[in-house]
Amino acid sequence: MPGYTDNKDAIQNRLRRIEGQVRGLQRMIDDDTYCIDVLTQVSAATKALQAVALTLLDDHLGHCVADAVAAGGADAEAKVAEASAAIARLVKS
């Protein structure tokens, strides 16, 4: 069971709002909207996606990684390494 199961509805609602933001960006381009205005909306959509990513990461650490660490063994090391790699990808983006 994924760590985000308890937050699934909230995450899906946020993703739907982000989807609407991206559709709005497409309309802005279709309407030849001023570049800076489009960039501002791109930034807002990016921040919204980052917020979803942080929520998912927090849920993963609190559920999947915590359970694996409690059980110990190689799975714990793998989950910690996996989480570390995910954090690195988020920081680089």
Image (cartoon, rainbow, N blue to C red):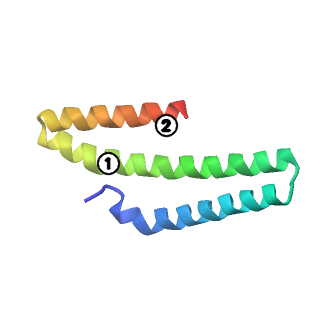
x and y, in percent, of residue 29 in the image: 79, 55
Label placed on residue 62: 1
Mark 2 or mark 1, earlier in chain: 1
Dot 1 surroundings within 10 Å: few (below 14), some, or many (20 or more)? few
Labels 2, 1: front one: 2
Q: Quadrant of the C terminus?
A: top right
Say which quarter of the image contains residue 5: bottom left
To which residue does mark 2 refer? Answer: 90
- Label 2 secondary element: helix
At horizontal 41% and vertical 63% (from top left) the residue drawn is: 7
* Picture layout, residue 93 above or below residue 18: above
Q: Quadrant of residue 3?
A: bottom left
Q: Residue at x 16, y 38 (%)?
A: 75
| SS for callout 1 | helix
In this view of the protein, which residue sits in the foreground, 62 or 38? 38
Image quadrant holding the N terminus, namely bottom left
Residue 35, position in %: x, y?
Answer: 84, 45
Numbered badge on residue 74: none
State how far apart marks 2 and 1 are (Cα): 18 Å
Residue 68 on image: x %, y %: 19, 43
Q: Is residue 9 above or below residue 58?
A: below
Disc 2: CA contacts within 10 A as few (<14), some (14-19) or many (>=20): few
Q: Is residue 84 left or right of residue 36?
A: left
Residue drawn at x 40%, y 65% as measured from the top left: 8
**Kind of residue indicated by mark 1:** Gly
* 64 sits to left or right of 17: left
Residue at the spot 34% in from the left edge and 37% down from the top edge: 83
Amino acid on which disc 2 is placed: Leu
